[in-house]
Image (spheres, rainbow, N blue to C red):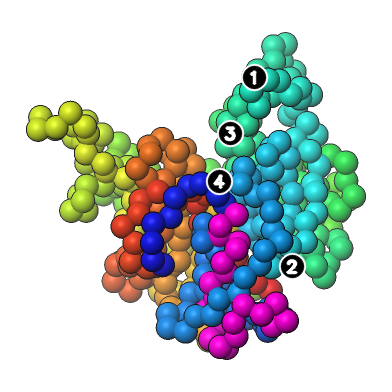
Amino acid sequence: MDGELEGKEILDFVREMVWGLGNGCGGDESNYQKFVVKNSTPFFLNKRGLQNKKEKEKSVFQLNAVQNLKDCRFVGSAHGWLVLLNNKSNPFLLDIISETRFQLPEKQTFPHIQGVREIENEGFEIQYKGEKDSACYSLKTIQEWLMVKAVLSGNPSCNGNYVVITMYDLHCRSKLALCRPGDNGWTGLCGELDSYDDIVCHENLLCALGCGPSVEIWDLNESSPRSKMMIQVDCPRKFTEVHKIYPRDLYTAKWYLASSSEDLFFVVRYIGEFVRYDGEVIYEGDTLTHNTSQPLVCPYKTVRFDVYKLDCKQKKWLEVESLNDIALFVGGNHSALLQVKEYPGCKANAIYFTDDYWDRMDEDIYYGGHDMGVFNMRDGSIEPFFDCDQERFEPPPFWIVPN
């Protein structure tokens, strides 16, 4: 990817779509169906467009009809669809290729919200259920906390019974809610866990990752899903030991849940809070120097992944040393495990990751959305997607896994 990407017009990224399907097609819209192929490699959605992860051959396909995404925030992707919040912070679904949109229940219908009133300067006053006083927020603030992450149980293009599930913020804890096609509001899911770190759908089951690590499961076939199972197992020994190597005052850990046809995987991502140009993780106070009035620019950066597989018989998380011929895609998307033989261009035994460190993404004008790359499970090395000196990507990139 050449050139400098500036955070001005999100529309730029849909006007020039970059693919790696290697079929030699140009920007003729009559060739549209040729791009929607079975087992197409996952797309990397950034401000320029959709970039397929094949290394060598690229084709360009232009779409001009997708409009009004400038002030939207991406909150999830699954089954080739995006979940976004619009410029009023109301959620909707978007198929970025066919440009099909489905509006979802609005923000005032979330389980914890009593009512919303629009105020001047593009702000909103929100009355929470069970609280006497209301609170006022800017559009950007609401977009940052209303939906932490969202996934779909199926593809809306071919399954009218799909469910949209979201993690929403309630006093710094992530709670769960869902909606179905035709619903007028979001339905809260009452679970046993106090907060959730990630969610995935597998064969119409919702699996939610929480403290422990533990997994809570709902049956989405029920009209009013209830928590069906709680999987509570011992914390992996290595997980405890690694925290000594990556102390919490220098690193943060993000948790993901991923599912294959047979197994559940617990994935831990370690991020250095302040990483110097030479790769050393330092304390925030060390970014200040005597030689300059400006602190050193030391962006956060992913340094390691650990993967564990759930063994239900032994009731424990087993360390996974190799993903073999599987590539794992994590970030703001529904986590995906893909067989590389079915997805040309993907590297085996690797973790493809994008930036989803929402708490710090907008704290500095020099970085944010930048923390992405490919982690090699064999030797622990991390390589970039492409050569680019830019450290600021707005909006942050997302993975889209086509059906």
Q: Residue at the spot x=53%, y=43% of the render?
A: 211
Q: Which residues are magenta?
A: 11-31
Q: Nearer the viewer, mark 2 or mark 1?
A: 2
Task: Report helix, strand or loop for mark 4.
Answer: strand
Name the residue tied to disc 2. Answer: 98
Left or right of 403? Residue 17 is left
Q: Which residue does the image show at 41% across and 67% down from the upper left?
A: 1
Mark 1 falls on what kind of element? strand
Q: CA distance from mark 2 to mark 1?
A: 37 Å
Determine if the magenta segment contains residue 83: no
Q: Which mark is residue 140?
A: 3
Q: Amino acid at mark 3?
A: Lys
Q: Residues within 10 Å of mark 3 (few under 14, many from 20)?
A: some
Q: CA distance from mark 2 to mark 3?
A: 28 Å
Q: How many marks?
A: 4
Residue 136 - label = 1
Locate residue 100: give its quadrant: bottom right
**Mark 3 or 4, closer to the camera:** 3
User: In this rendering, does residue 191 appear at all?
Assistant: no
Identify residue for label 4.
Answer: 197
Q: In which quadrant will I find the C terminus?
A: bottom right
Q: Would you say residue 24 sits in the magenta stretch?
A: yes
Q: Secondary structure at mark 2?
A: loop
